[in-house]
Each structure stands twice: as structure tokens, then as C-alpha cells.
Image (spheres, rainbow, N blue to C red):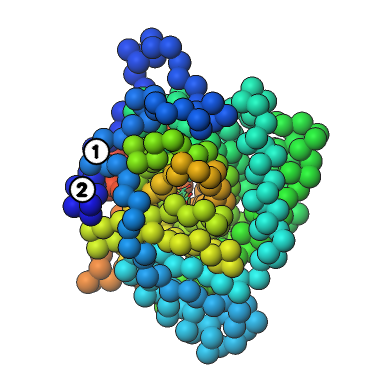
Amino acid sequence: MAIECISSIQSVPQTQKNHKEEEEPPLVFDASLLRHQLHLPRQFIWPDEEKPCMNVPELLVPLIDLGGFLSGDPIATMKAARLVGEACQKHGFFLVVNHGIDPKLISHAHSYMDDFFEIPLSQKQRAQRKTGEHCGYASSFTGRFSSKLPWKETLSFQYSAEEKSSTIVKDYLCNTLGQEFEQFGKVYQDYCDSMSTLSLGIMELLGMSLGVGKVFREFFEENSSIMRLNYYPPCQKPDLTLGTGPHCDPTSLTILHQDQVGGLQVFVDNEWHSISPNFNAFVVNIGDTFMALSNGRYKSCLHRAVVNSKTTRKSLAFFLCPNSDKVISPPSELVNDLTSRVYPDFTWPMLLEFTQKHYRADMNTLEAFTNWLQHKRN
Ligand SMILES: C=C1C[C@]23C[C@@]1(O)CC[C@H]2[C@@]12CCC[C@@](C)(C(=O)O1)[C@H]2[C@@H]3C(=O)O
Ligand SMILES: O=C(O)CCC(=O)C(=O)O
Ligand SMILES: [Fe+2]
């Protein structure tokens, strides 16, 4: 089983929709119908080498207690920074507990997802994500790609920590979905504010672990991040498809909360591993932008999500991103005679444009982006 999965790791860029395929009747991912369907449309059937393995070993990730760090205990802080550093050198995934986020807010953030995803498709489409944009409602990627489509719906929105008390999330959700979504908007505004605060704490630990103090915390203090609600309907043929295909997050740091269903898998030591659900924990992982910021010391790791035939699965993903004018350039302490610069300077909007217009994110995004940038500059 594992061998089948190992060969799935390829670097072939995925097909964007082309003219010929646009002549086929448009494919619609209406979860209320597809969840019962025994025959999956061909676009959702992944190639054999990439089909999921369900019974995979569990990934041993450290459970990092942030309680001591958040209350200013220096010994606990050093321990947390050491564990974060070790995990990020190996694969870039770890769990945090005692993170200070109100469990009621987490529960609400999960339950309010049903308020949106269970309304009729035509109403969800009020927030339809447009081609080339990364925010809004997407039912799979039917308008964007013609193969290896993910079995999921997403609602994504922009977050800004630039101004204190910004209401960007609440305003966007209310304006696009209507006043009846005011409470919905408030929940995700609060959730994003909490995620931004938590991510700054984690950035402080990452900085300590790399010997650069609060440099990263300060770099992300005015972040312009992305929040994504992932909603995976049941699938009658879960062994043929994937909820989220294999990819490394192009962003800087992801803080994910998955519900009790399970489905997140990470590719480590040449095989897929699961990360079991834990309500008290957030799953944290390094993205490509932080890998570049750390001059390649910390890893952005390949991961995916599988679906199942019985239960809808939900996950909440906060993607920390730098403000658009910030240049991704590692601190001088991380560049020396032994480790010269691994990646060129870039800004987050440049990488975002690359993944939206030129390349479907996979495990080689950062390398492909680096080559693309160098060609453009020469
Ligand atoms: C499944 C995917 C959606 C995504 C591109 C990808 O293939 C892998 C990463 C995803 C993500 C997460 C953060 C925001 C986003 C815009 C990005 O840069 O990477 C999305 C991509 C997307 O929705 O297009
Ligand atoms: O739902 C999950 O567990 C993973 C989702 C993910 O990787 C993503 O949204 O980037
Ligand atoms: Fe991801």
C-alpha cells in the first residue's frame, strides 16, 4: 500500500482549464447531490499513483504546551522553542495545546460553518470566488481545473491585522452574504483575531529557535492573512478521490483546527502519515514563504486530506501571510559562508499571483517560483 503512495509524489504541473474542455457542459459541484452519488464524475477521480491510502501510520508530532510561554515562564518558553525548532527541521508540523483560545469560539467557528455550507448552492454562489481571485466560495475547483478536482467546498476571506479593531472579515461576510450573516461574520472576525495573536506567539518561538529573537514576530505584526473554511461532504467512493490534493502551503504559517472526523495526512520519510483529531490542539505547519524566510532551514511539508463515505468533515485554516509590501528576505544571522541565500527576494503577492495564474501549488511550488522569477528577471 505504501509503495503505491510513494510513487504519487511527482512534480508535474497540473492542468489549468483549457479551451477544449470549456466546450464540455460545465461541471457543477453540488454537494447536496454528489454526496449520494455512486458514480463520481471523471474529474474527481485521481490517478492510481495518487489515490489515497486510508490506513496510514500516525505521524509522531510533538504536542507543544504553550501555557508556560504565554504566561512568561522562561524555562517553559525555552522548552517550547526547542520543540518547535526540532519539528520544523524534520517536517514542519507540530501541535499546540494550552494555546489560550477560548474553546467556545472554536466550537462556534465549526458549527457556524453549517449555516453557510448547508444553504442551497445558488445562495452560496452569492459569494462565488472569481477566476484569479483567492477569496470567496469555491465548490471544488470546477471553474479552474479540469482534472484531479478536490472533493470539497471552501469559503475563503482576507484578514488584516494592520489596524487594531479592523472589521474586514465581518464586513466582507455581511456585505456578500447579507445582513442575516452578521453573527456569522462576528464569529469569524473573532476567530481570525485570535489566530493572528496566536500566530505571532508562534512566530516568536520560531524566531527564538533560530536565534533571531523577535524578528519574525515583528515582521508579521501587521499581517494580511487568509482564512479558509474547508467543508468536505461525504463521498460514496472515498478511495478514488481526495478532499485536498497533495500540496505544500505557499503561505507562511498555517494554523489548522480539524473536527473529530479525521482526514489530514502528511508525507514524511517517504510515506503518508495521519494526524489524528484532537479538539484541544491546533495543527501548525510551516509554509513555503516561511521556508524562504528561514533561508531553507525550516521545512514546508507535503500534506493532503482524505474524505470518507459517512460523515462531513470540517477544518478551519488560518494562513498567516506577510503584508504586501514586506520583502521575503532572511535575517542576516541565517545567511553565512556555509549557508548562502537559497531563495531570491520576493513579496507574498508575487508568489500568490504565481499560484493563482501560472502554477497549481504542489510540493515544488517554491522551486518552480524561484526559477520563474529568475527567468523573468534575466
Ligand atoms: C488546494 C489548494 C488551494 C490553494 C492552492 C492549493 O493547491 C494548495 C494551497 C491552497 C492555498 C492555501 C492558502 C491560500 C491559497 C490562495 C494559497 O496560496 O494556497 C490557497 C490556494 C487556492 O485556493 O488557490
Ligand atoms: O483539511 C485539512 O485537514 C487540510 C486542509 C489544507 O491543507 C489546506 O486548506 O491547505
Ligand atoms: Fe494545506
**Type of residue at label 2?**
Glu
> Which quarter of the picture shows residue 340?
bottom left
Residue at image position (59%, 67%) is 280
Q: State which quarter of the image contains the C terminus.
A: top left
Chain-order first, disc 2 or disc 1: 2
146 vs 151, left or right, is left
**Total numbered labels placed on residues in the image:** 2
- Front residue of 164/227: it is 227
- Front residue of 116/276: it is 276
Of all residues, the one furthest to the top in this rendering is: 23
Q: Position of residue 40 (x, y in %)?
A: 39, 27
Q: Position of residue 301 (x, y in %)?
A: 35, 57
Badge 1 marks a residue whose secondary structure is helix
The crowd level at tag 2 (other Cα within 10 Å; few <14, some 14-19, many 20+) is some
Residue at image position (20%, 48%) is 4
Residue at image position (28%, 47%) is 364
Q: Disc 1 designates what residue?
A: 48
Q: Disc 2 designates what residue?
A: 4
Whether pointer 2 and pointer 1 mark residues with C-beta atoms closer than 8 Å, the reply is yes
Q: Position of residue 146 (x, y in %)?
A: 36, 25
Can residue 346 be seen?
no
370 over 207 or under it: above or below: above
> Which quarter of the picture shows residue 353?
top left
- Front residue of 267/221: it is 267
Badge 2 marks a residue whose secondary structure is helix
Can residue 69 be seen?
yes
**Type of residue at label 1?**
Asp
Residue at image position (48%, 74%) is 63
